[in-house]
Image (tube, grey):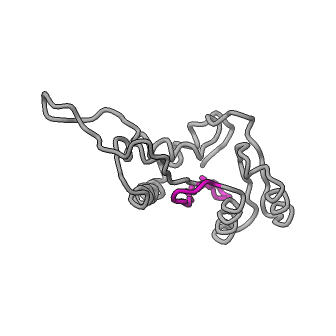
Amino acid sequence: MLMAPLVRRSWAPRGHRPVLRQRTHSHTKVSVIGTLVVAPRRDRVGFYFRLHADANINTARVIGFLDQLGRQLRGPIVLLWDRCGPHKSGAMKAYLREHSRLYPEYFPPYAPELNPAEGPWGYLKLNPMANLALTQVDELAAVTRRHGRSVQRRESLLRAFIKHVPLPLRLV
């Protein structure tokens, strides 16, 4: 999530242009890592995420996320992954060899439309966080966390993200 807002339609009094004040030329951001989880019997869908203020997602952060995910989920975990650098790194390959519960499967290159985990972030950017112009990265992280948690509580929305992708993923 970038500090610069994704500008969508907005409202203003008649005859006045809407004004979104923002920090210009700011490359400050909140990086996010997240996943949609389908329970083994496919009767529950969950959304797990972690935010990193003004930092990039690297292999160490992905491993930390997987460690936390592994503590919260039981049984084998199939990872449907895009081909970003941390997912393919040597350190990640070594980590996966040591953790036999994790089974990575990769999407074809340049196929974000197949990744159901893109759904929550696109939804947040286009809906509750559209036109949101913040000036502090801590504010952006807090607002992103709040809206992400609200998405976590909407299982019907999470199911819609999974059903939207053209993959043979079945839900009960």
Residue 162 percent across, percent down from the top left: 58, 43
**Relative horizontal placement of residue 45, taking residue 138 as reference (left or right):** right
**Which quarter of the figure has residue 100?**
bottom right
Q: Main secondary structure of the magenta part?
A: strand
Which stretch did the figure color magenta?
Answer: 33-57
| Residue displayed at 69% across by 33% down | 110
In the image, 21 versus 156, the foreground residue is 21
| Residue displayed at 43% across by 57% down | 137
Outermost residue to the top: 15
Residue 63 percent across, percent down from the top left: 71, 63
Residue 116 percent across, percent down from the top left: 60, 43
**Which quarter of the figure has residue 94?**
bottom right
**Relative horizontal placement of residue 113, taking residue 143 as reference (left or right):** right
| Residue displayed at 63% across by 41% down | 115
Residue 166 percent across, percent down from the top left: 64, 33
120 in magenta: no
**Relative horizontal placement of residue 132, taking residue 42 as reference (left or right):** left
